[in-house]
Amino acid sequence: MLATEQKEQKASTQQTWTEVIAPQGNLFDLKLREVWRYKDLLILFVKRDFKAQYKQTIFGPLWHVIQPIFTTLIFFILFKSLAKIPTDGLPPILFYMSSLTIWNYFAACFTSTSNTFVANAGIFGKVYFPRLVLPLSIVLSNMVKFCIQLGLLTAFIAGYSIFSDYQFTPGINLLLIPFIAFMMGILGLGLGIIISSLTTKYRDLSVLIQFGIQLLMYITPVAYPLSFVMQSRFKGLMLFNPLSSMVEGFRYAVFGSGMLSTSLIIYSIIFSVVALFIGIITFNKVERSFMDTV
C-alpha cells in the first residue's frame, strides 16, 4: 500500500503542464504569441460578430449596402443641395460615399471595442483566453464590412465612369487604401479599449460614446473637404483631429484629389500608435480585476 502511494506521488511530481495560468505581472506584456496561439478562437469570434449582428433581420448583410446609400443621399440633400458645400470637384455622391466608407469602419471599431468588458463579462468569467482576442476580432470583423462597402464604392465609381462625364483614372495612390484602413483600425482599437477599460467602473460612458461619435463626425471632414474649413476659425480644431487627415487621405487614395499633407499623416500615425499603446496598457491593468466591478 505504501509503495503504491509513493509511486503515485512520484508520478504526480513528474507531470508536465501544457498551460499555466498566472497573474500578469507586467503591464507591458502584450502576450502577442499567446494571441497567435488562439488564432482559431479569434477567427471564430470574427464569424460570430459578423453573423450575430444581423441575425433575425430582414435584409441581413445587405444593411452594409443600404446604410451607406441612404446616408449618402441624406448628405447630398443637406450639404450639397441646401448648404451648397463644394466637394473638391468630385461628384457629390462619390465624395460622400468614399468618406462614409472609411468613417463607418472607424466608428464601428471604436463603438464596438469600447464595450468589450461589459458586453463579454459572462464569457470572461467562465473560461480563460487572452482577453485581447475579443477587441481584435471586432476590428477584423469590421474589416469585412469595410471591404463590402469598398466594393459598393467601386461599383458606383464604375457606374459614374460609364454613364456620366466623370472619368476615373486609377493610379499608384490606390496603394494607400490598405495602409489608411489599417491605421484607422489601430486608432479605433486603441481609443475603444481605453473607453472599454473605463466603462467597467463608469457605465454612463457608453451612453456618452454613442452621442460623442455623432458629434465627432461633424468635426471630421466627412461631409465636406478639409480645404473648405482651412480659412475658418475652426481650422486648428480640424487639424488637431487625427481623423481629418485620414479621411482626406482616403479620398486622395481613391480619387487622387484632395489635401494630402505628409506632416498631418505623420501626426495621425503617431497619435494612433500612442493611443494603441496606452490602450493596451490600460486594458492589461483593468483585466486583472474587472470581474469585481462589472
Image: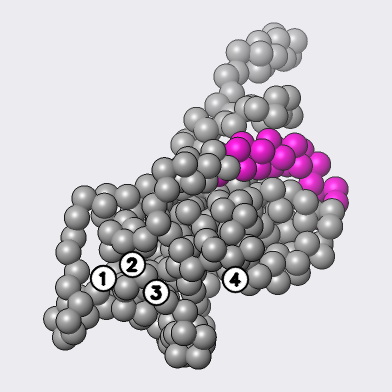
Number of residues whose C-alpha sits closer than 10 Å to that of mark 1, classed few (under 14), some (14–19) or many (20 or more): some
Q: The residue tagged with tag 3: helix, strand or loop?
A: loop
Mark 1 — residue? 154
Query: Which numbered mark, 2 or 3, is in the foreground of this view?
Result: 3
Q: Are marks 2 and 1 in contact (CB under 8 Å)?
A: yes
Mark 2 — residue? 150
Where's residue 19, x and y in %? Answer: 59, 29
On whether residue 278 falls in the magenta region, the answer is yes
* Among the two numbered marks 2 and 4 on one chain, the one whose residue lies closer to the N terminus: 2
Q: CA distance from mark 2 to mark 4?
A: 22 Å
Where's residue 143, x and y in %? Answer: 42, 59
Q: Amino acid at mark 3?
A: Thr
Residue, far front: 231
Q: CA distance from mark 2 to mark 1?
A: 6 Å
**Residue at 22 percent of width and 80 percent of height:** 160
Q: CA distance from mark 2 to mark 3?
A: 19 Å
- 136, 124: nearer the viewer: 136
Number of residues whose C-alpha sits closer than 10 Å to that of mark 2, classed few (under 14), some (14–19) or many (20 or more): some
- 86, 253: nearer the viewer: 86
Where's residue 229, x and y in %? Answer: 53, 66
| Relative height, residue 27 to residue 1 (above, below) | below
